[in-house]
Image: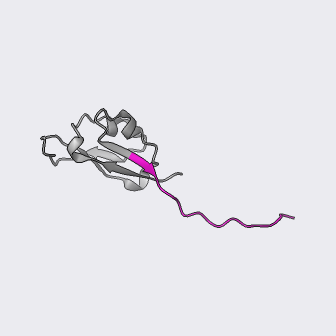
Amino acid sequence: MAKGRVSIVVERCKACGFCVEFCPTHVLALSCAFNSKGYHPPHVVHPEKCSGCDLCGMYCPDFAIYATKTAEAQAPKASGCAK
């Protein structure tokens, strides 16, 4: 499974909850803390589950969140011919 990382711009968030609702792997939850505008922004509760699909960013009307895919450590592939 692909791995990803969520980035949140807390001060842009208006706590609509779309990112939490549409995350297919349930990485996010709304925080109990407030941003400077008085909204509860999301926070990452299960970072290990993020696939980097960026559905959170696609649904965010305020461009306050986005996800990126991270490079995975891959096992070296064997070279040569199989016999």
Look at 19% across and 42% down and name the residue there. 40
Main secondary structure along the magenta-highlighted residues: loop
Q: Nearer the viewer, residue 24 or 68?
A: 68
- Residue range of the region highlighted in magenta in the rendering: 67-83
Relative to 52, does residue 58 appear above or below in the rendering? above
Look at 59% across and 63% down and name the residue there. 74
Relative to 19, does residue 5 appear above or below in the rendering? below
Q: Give percent across and percent down for residue 51.
A: 46, 48
Look at 32% across and 40% down and name the residue there. 20
Q: Give percent across and percent down for residue 13.
A: 23, 40
Q: Give percent across and percent down for residue 54.
A: 42, 42
**Residue 81 lies in quadrant:** bottom right
What kind of colouring is applied to the model shown? one colour
Which quadrant of the figure contains the C terminus?
bottom right
| Magenta stretch encompasses residue 11 | no
Relative to 74, 28 lies left or right:
left
